[in-house]
Structures are given as structure tokens and as C-alpha cells.
Amino acid sequence: MVTHVPAEAHGDERGALLSFVEAQRGAIRRSLIGLTEEQAASRPSASGLNLSGLLKHVAETELNWLRLAQQRPNEKARTEETWADSFRLVGDETVPQMLEFWAKVAAETEEFVHSVESMNDTFPLPEAPWFPKDEKCSMRWLLVHLVEEIARHAGHADIIRESLDGRTAFELVAQEAGYPSQS
């Protein structure tokens, strides 16, 4: 991670974990700075991943985990047939639309996490071959998992962006902070 995240943001565990989730969101967002829709959708490596698809995937993934924790239906739930569409923009979807969608999901995640009584509160995992039967997860686990999930894809985004135009995460952080270009 190329940004500093205060260990006790907002003075508590909840705030610190939310700050780490936000730091990882920022890494994904920064990977898209200054790119066209075509560049964001391009695949400059052997992987099928692209920046706009990663953006959509992490936004939808965060929404999915939020809905699980809220124990509400996910309005963007994927099926086996539509799973691949979670990694690419389809139809008239754009990067700005995905950024706006994710900002709303992020705000809802933060509001929800602040509303729960305890980080020890739990929610059930759905029945799936990759989850233990009758398993429950805590709100703490949810936030740690979001850090893990988004950070994993932020690393992918760093490599894709550098493959596109040579820009590194350090340069993008500096640009976002308003520092003059070193090139």
C-alpha cells in the first residue's frame, strides 16, 4: 500500500477498519485516473482482467457482502450465466457510472457498519460449496474480508495500469494529492 492509513482512524476499531477499506477503494479509483473508456477496458497482459472490469467487480462484490450482512436480497446478484459480466462493462455502462455506483455502495456500507451494535454481531453465510455449512461471520470479519478482496484487485490494477502507460501507484497517489509530475 502506498498511502498512510491511521491505525486508529476515528479512535476505534470500526473506524480503523473502514479507513483501510477506503484506502483500498482509493487504489482502484486511482488506477483509472486520466484513462479513456477504451484504455480502461483494454487488457494489456495475458490476463483477461481490465481496469473498468475490476472497478465493476469490486463494487458489485462489496454490494453483495453488504446485502449478506444486512440479510437483504442483492439487487445485482449474479448467476452462473452472468458471472463474467461482473468483470466487464456491458451495454452503456461507463467508468463514471461505476464510480458513482460504488460511491453509493461505499456510503451504504459505512452507514450500515456504524449502525450495528457491535463488531461481534454476525450474519449467516449463504449455502454454497465454498462456505462451511451454517457458518456465520462477524462485522469485523466482513471489513477484513473487504480489505482483502479489494486489495487483491488493487494489486491487479497496479500491474494493469503500469502495463498500459508506465504510471505507477506512487505517481498516481502523488497526482491525486496535487504534487507536480516527476517525469
Image (tube, grey):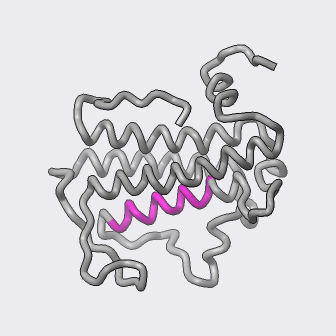
Residue 15 vs 132, above or below: the answer is above
The answer to whether residue 34 is left or right of residue 22 is: right
Counting from the top left corner in percent of width and height, residue 146 is at 42, 54
Counting from the top left corner in percent of width and height, residue 50 is at 73, 56
Q: Quadrant of residue 127?
A: bottom left
Please state the total of marks drawn on the protein image: 0
Q: Quadrant of residue 36?
A: top right
The answer to whether residue 11 is left or right of residue 54 is: left
Please give the range of residues in magenta. 55-68
The residue nearer to you, when weighing 25 against 37, is 25
The answer to whether residue 51 is left or right of residue 62 is: right
Dominant secondary-structure state across the stretch colored magenta: helix
Residue 55 vs 46, above or below: the answer is above
Task: Look at the image and say whether residue 58 sits in the magenta stretch.
Answer: yes
Q: Quadrant of residue 26?
A: top right
Counting from the top left corner in percent of width and height, residue 151 is at 52, 49
Q: Residue furthest top?
A: 180
Residue lying at 71% horizontally and 34% vertically, measured from the top left: 168
Residue lying at 26% horizontally and 76% vertically, measured from the top left: 135
The quadrant in which the C terminus is found is top right
Residue lying at 21% horizontally and 51% vertically, measured from the top left: 119
Counting from the top left corner in percent of width and height, residue 130 is at 42, 79
Task: Look at the image and say whether residue 125 sits in the magenta stretch.
Answer: no
Residue lying at 58% horizontally and 40% vertically, measured from the top left: 27
The answer to whether residue 28 is left or right of residue 160 is: left
Residue 84 vs 142, above or below: the answer is below
The residue nearer to you, when weighing 25 against 103, is 25
